[in-house]
């Protein structure tokens, strides 16, 4: 009897806890930018596994950003709802206040042309993207000539 209950508990932990440890590619949305290979609003995945480049894939459309060419990156979040004070208070009583999370990446493309892209995704995906870029695009976080960090280097701002 004890072994049956033990195996039942182990099976339940496997089926319930298994998805918690599965690593799935998180969806992000290409909001806007200078990349013409991908249409605005395209949902896709970001591949961070390459040590040399960040790759966005949306069906047949894709682009990559070499970490060595990243000049700056920034995380910011916006309120999903833009209301006045009284409607915001009333709305906030019944619905959780949602935020949209964005990452803007600036890099130097082919022929030294500046490129920029803004991606939107869940907070966990955007924060994970920032951590990878802080580690692999270290040139974007170096201080300027006066010792002041000239690029935003992923700092958080509220809009």
Image: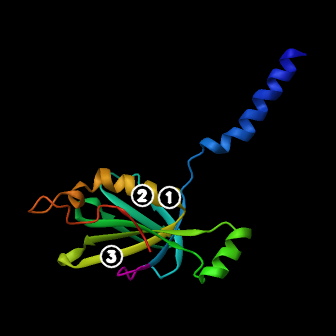
Q: Position of residue 52 (x, y in %)?
A: 29, 55
Image quadrant for the C terminus?
bottom left
- The residue tagged 1 is 125
Q: Earlier in the sequence, mark 3 or mark 1?
A: 3
| Residue in the picture at 28% in, 65% down | 152
Q: Secondary structure at mark 2?
A: helix
What's the distance in space between the residues labelled 3 and 1, CA to CA?
19 Å
- The residue tagged 3 is 116
Is residue 59 visible to us here? no
Q: Secondary structure at mark 3?
A: strand
Main SS, magenta region, reads loop
Tell whether position 145 is magenta. no
Q: Is residue 91 left or right of residue 68?
A: right
What's the distance in space between the residues labelled 1 and 2, CA to CA?
6 Å
Q: How busy is the neighbourhood of tag 1: few (under 14 within 10 Å), some, or many (20 plus)?
A: some
Q: Which residues are magenta?
A: 32-37
């Amino acid at each position: 009897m004890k072994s049956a209950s033990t195996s039942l508990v182990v099976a339940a932990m496997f089926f319930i806890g298994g998805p918690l440890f599965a690593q799935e590619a998180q969806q992000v949305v290409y909001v806007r930018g200078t990349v013409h290979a991908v249409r605005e609003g395209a949902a896709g995945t970001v591949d961070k596994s390459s040590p040399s480049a960040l790759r966005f894939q949306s069906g047949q459309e894709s682009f990559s950003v070499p970490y060595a060419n990243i000049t700056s990156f920034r995380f910011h979040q916006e309120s999903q709802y833009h209301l006045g004070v009284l409607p915001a208070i009333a709305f906030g009583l019944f619905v959780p206040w949602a935020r949209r999370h964005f990452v803007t990446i600036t890099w130097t493309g082919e022929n030294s042309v500046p490129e920029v892209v803004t991606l939107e995704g869940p907070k966990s995906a955007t924060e994970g993207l920032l951590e990878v870029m802080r580690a692999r695009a270290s040139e974007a976080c170096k201080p300027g000539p006066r010792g002041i960090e000239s690029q935003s280097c992923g700092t958080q701002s509220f809009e």
